């Protein structure tokens, strides 16, 4: 993975991942397009996570627009300012969406398939369990 990690997207997943990587000694930069981090998290967990990420040394840039990813850095702008962060690895943790291409292929081949969990709809653990439960109840 290398030492320098840039996480693009500071929602729940990006923020927790940045914190987790920083705890394990990585030099982490978190680049978020909006102003707020960890949006789907309930308060006060969100505040705690943002503070902990900062305490662990995560460099946080808000209102940042990524312009280019090169072999060793991520370039972005914050307002008029052009910035960059070193990156031996880039994690894209924004714009999460559901998808089940394997299920689509199986269905096209005539196999009966049911998609449950985040593959069908991004909806946290409870949603994943609920969608599986709904299907299990049809038997
Ligand atoms: C950093 C982070 C923090 C989160 N925190 C929370 C939280 O606090 N509360 C909450 O409710 N939700 C949280 N979530 C979301 C939660 O993890 C997901 O909503 C939930 O795990 C979805 O369950 P799932 O079973 O649909 O998918 P997953 O848990 O992703 O399980 C899918 C499994 O299928 C495997 N798989 C994929 N493709 C194949 C294949 N072709 N063959 C075999 N295996 C395959 C994967 O390896 C994986 O093990 C978090 C997610 C992340 C990333």
Image: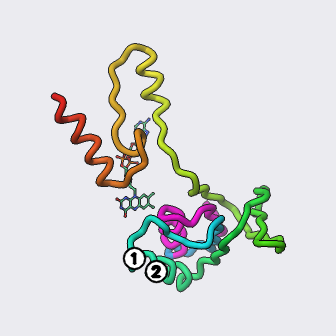
Residue 48 is left or right of residue 28, and the answer is left
Residue at position x 41%, y 43% from top? 121
Residue at position x 61%, y 72% from top? 35
**Residue underneath mark 2:** 47
Residue 131 is left or right of residue 73, and the answer is left
Stretch in magenta = 1-22
Between residue 80 and residue 13, name the one nearer to us: 80
Q: Work out which residue is located at the far bottom of the displayed protein and give it.
A: 55
Q: Secondary structure at mark 1?
A: loop
Residue 5 visible at all = no
Q: How many marks?
A: 2
Residue 94, image x and y in percent?
A: 58, 56
Residue 60, image x and y in percent?
A: 63, 76
Residue at position x 42%, y 28% from top? 103
Would you place residue 16 above or below residue 56 in this image? above
Q: Secondary structure at mark 2?
A: helix
Q: Quadrant of residue 65?
A: bottom right
Would you place residue 112 above or below residue 44 in this image? above
Residue 82, image x and y in percent?
A: 83, 71
Residue 72 is left or right of residue 94, and the answer is right
Which image quarter is the C terminus in? Answer: top left
Residue 65 visible at all = yes
Disc 1/disc 2 C-alpha distance (Å): 7 Å
Would you place residue 92 above or below residue 29 in this image? above
CB under 8 Å between discs 1 and 2: yes
Residue 96 is left or right of residue 76, and the answer is left
Other residues around mark 2 within 10 Å, as few (<14) / some (14–19) / many (≥20): some
User: What numbered label is drawn on residue 43?
Assistant: 1
Residue at position x 78%, y 68% from top? 77
């Amino acid at each position: 993975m290398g030492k320098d990690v840039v996480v693009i997207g500071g929602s729940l997943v990006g923020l927790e991942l940045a914190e987790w990587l920083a705890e394990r000694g990585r030099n982490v930069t978190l680049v978020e397009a909006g102003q707020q981090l960890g949006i789907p998290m309930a308060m006060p967990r969100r505040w705690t996570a943002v503070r902990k990420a900062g305490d662990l040394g995560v460099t946080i840039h808000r209102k940042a627009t990524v312009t280019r990813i090169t072999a060793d850095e991520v370039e972005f702008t914050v307002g008029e300012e052009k910035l960059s962060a070193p990156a031996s690895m880039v994690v894209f943790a924004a714009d999460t969406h559901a998808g089940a291409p394997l299920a689509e292929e199986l269905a096209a081949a005539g196999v009966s398939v049911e998609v449950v969990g985040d593959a069908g709809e991004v909806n946290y653990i409870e949603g994943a369990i609920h969608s599986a439960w709904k299907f299990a109840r049809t038997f």
